[in-house]
Amino acid sequence: MKTTKSTCFALLFMTVLAVRSEPFRTDLNPALLYYQAFLMAPQTMSDADWDYLGSKAGLEQKLPKRFGPILANYDVEFKLAQEAAQQKAPCDWGIDLSRGPGTFLPHLRFIKAVAVASKPRVRWNLEHRNQTGARDDLLTAFVLGRNASRDGTLIGALVQYACETLVLGTIAENFGQFSPATLQQLEAGFETAPMQGTMAAAIMTEKLDHVDWLANKLLKLQQANPGNDSNVLAAIQKDDELSALGKYDETGKQDTNFWQLIVAASGGTTDGILKLIKETEPLYLRLVKIMTLPLPEYD
């Protein structure tokens, strides 16, 4: 009996080891792993630590030993983000653009935070002759930045460019410490990263979740108040999402007359407002054409 039990336990133990030795899945939505990574993000470094990293001494001297445990706290987050970067499925952040201008994009600040954290981690790894760790952190941050633009929003594309700037800046600042092999591996990783999202493509998403969203909101209010335009105009003033559009003007000051000005410019009708909205559509298409021109023509 004891022999049988021992054999069963041995087989079970070997089975567990076999399962653990299997490579991680690569068929997951990368966003799922990225969200898990964000949950594992440690408490950020203190302001004093960040100030030191940016100081003259912090830039010219090797990092003090105390940064070892601080930067190691990011290991789990970076490991999950690295696994996400190796997924074969497209990255879908699950963002619902039907909320229009009020759409929440909570993942973007975490994406930027990973890119920022990669900078001192790469430096620490290079100072301790860990070329592989430095390479992996840079490629992880780079791919994550590219995936920031997958929702097609303008702010997502901007965060992507910010991450790329951080990654490339980190390489430039530490260029002499990278081995030729590591530099080649970084180049290869950049070449195989997800395609870069463009500002031109994001313009049409902006049209979708701003102009088109606004037109649909007004059409629904018309349908809810057939033949009663005064009720529609009154409903616009009471709608929280619509009233939020006029809270601040271009200088950042509160604008309490936004909708009154729009109503006046439209001739005092909902159809007039919809006409004004439709007139903006060619401007978006024109802007997309301009933004895809080569630099001299674009200027």
Image: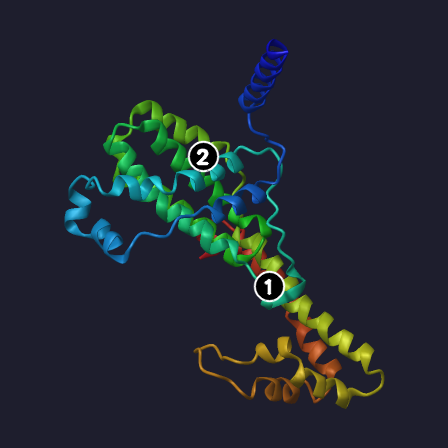
Residue 282 visible from this viewpoint: no
The 10 Å Cα crowd at callout 1, few under 14, some 14 to 19, many 20 or more, is few
Q: Position of residue 115 (x, y in %)?
A: 40, 46
Residue 189 visible from this viewpoint: yes
Disc 1 element: loop
Q: Are marks 2 and 1 in contact (CB under 8 Å)?
A: no
Question: Which image quadrant is residue 236 in?
Answer: bottom right
Residue behind mark 1:
103
Amino acid marked by disc 1:
Thr
Disc 2 element: helix
Residue under the point 77% across and 74% down: 220
Residue behind mark 2:
190
Quadrant (top left/top right/bottom left/bottom right) for the N terminus: top right
On screen, residue 221 above or below 85: below
Q: Position of residue 133 (x, y in %)?
A: 36, 31
Residue under the point 54% across and 87% down: 256
> Residue 160 versus residue 199: which sits nearer the camera?
160
Q: Is residue 168 left or right of residue 89?
A: left
On screen, residue 119 above or below 178: below
Q: Position of residue 230 (x, y in %)?
A: 76, 90
Amino acid marked by disc 2:
Phe
On screen, residue 126 above or below 221: above
Indicate which label's residue lies in the foreground, 2 or 1.
1
**Could you tell me how many numbered marks the image carries?**
2
State how far apart marks 2 and 1 are (Cα). Answer: 30 Å
